[in-house]
Image: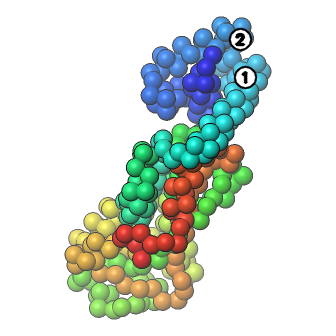
Amino acid sequence: MNIANFRVFSNLVETQSFSKAARMNSITQSAVSQQLRTMERHFKVLIVDRSQKKFRLTREGQKLYDSAKDILHRYEKLNCELLEMRKVISGNIHIATIYSIGLHELPPYIKRFLKKYPSVNVRVEYRRSNLVYDDIRHNAVDLGLVAFPNQTRQLEVIPFCEDDLVLICHPKHRLAQYARVSISDLKDDKLIGFESDIPTRRATDQILRDQNLNPEPIMEFDNIETVKRAVEINAGIAIVPKATVQQEIMQGTVVQVGLNGGAYTRPLAIIHRKGRVLTPAMKKFIETLTSKIGVEGKD
């Protein structure tokens, strides 16, 4: 048995999926199955109850999983402590982020981080919000970046920044002539929104309901880029994070209009699984994101 065996086994238990465990460790599904059988032969126990349709550990399998997690934690902690003693900032950081943060908020921070720590490899994966949380819970990624973060016992939530929510419309739309409007001014307009399970959509719905408007978008999309394209063809208006539309505003394809009546913001946060050992590189990356020092492309 070695550390890799325990890591694959832990990933299998946490995801309850041979395919996901294989993908997380860059091996085949058959290799995951083979490692499981090897562990059963080595410890002379049945680890997975194969009489059940759903993935289920035996009592011995649960004990092995608990011990494997402890071994992995101790190994990762030792490795991080040795790196810190040597003052080494290197290795890999795997990040899962929603599209809007990954495309519009994150790039200048990554540029700054890699300039300072060129030996670190940062891998960014774009995911829907619910899948970012799944990835963190299953240890499939190191860090997650989300909007309107959920507070749960499993997660460590670190505030990252806040972004204003603004109205965007086509340059020829009737609202384009105004610098700011009230929410009530939107009652007769066609609204383009995110899909209903996306946190920013839930937040914008609440903003409208607070002004006695019933939010019923004529179009719903799962990412900011498609929302913007719909506004550009004058299909309707949308409430979006300000940072995501700077390029379109500069190009004149959409117009930004401020919203009266309150401070409408979108909080962003870094999340990771509680108890996870953070490498020196991960700590420095979090430090870069939360630093008050400006970065290129940010105010």
Residue drawn at x 54%, y 83% is 263
Residue 108: x, y in percent? 38, 63
Q: Is residue 94 visible?
A: no
Residue drawn at x 44%, y 46% is 120
Q: In the rendered view of the protein, which quadrant contains the C terminus? A: bottom left
Q: Quadrant of residue 158?
A: bottom right
What residue sits right under mark 1 in the picture? 64
Going by the picture, which residue comes out furthest to the front?
Answer: 86
Q: Nearer the viewer, residue 13 or 206?
A: 13
Circle 1 packing at 10 Å, graded few (<14), some (14-19), many (20+), is: many
Quick check: marks 2 and 1 in contact, CB under 8 Å? yes
Q: Secondary structure at mark 1?
A: helix
Residue 169: x, y in percent? 31, 79
Residue drawn at x 43%, y 56% is 116
Residue drawn at x 66%, y 54% is 156
* Type of amino acid under label 2: Phe
Residue 30: x, y in percent? 48, 16
Q: Quadrant of residue 194?
A: bottom left
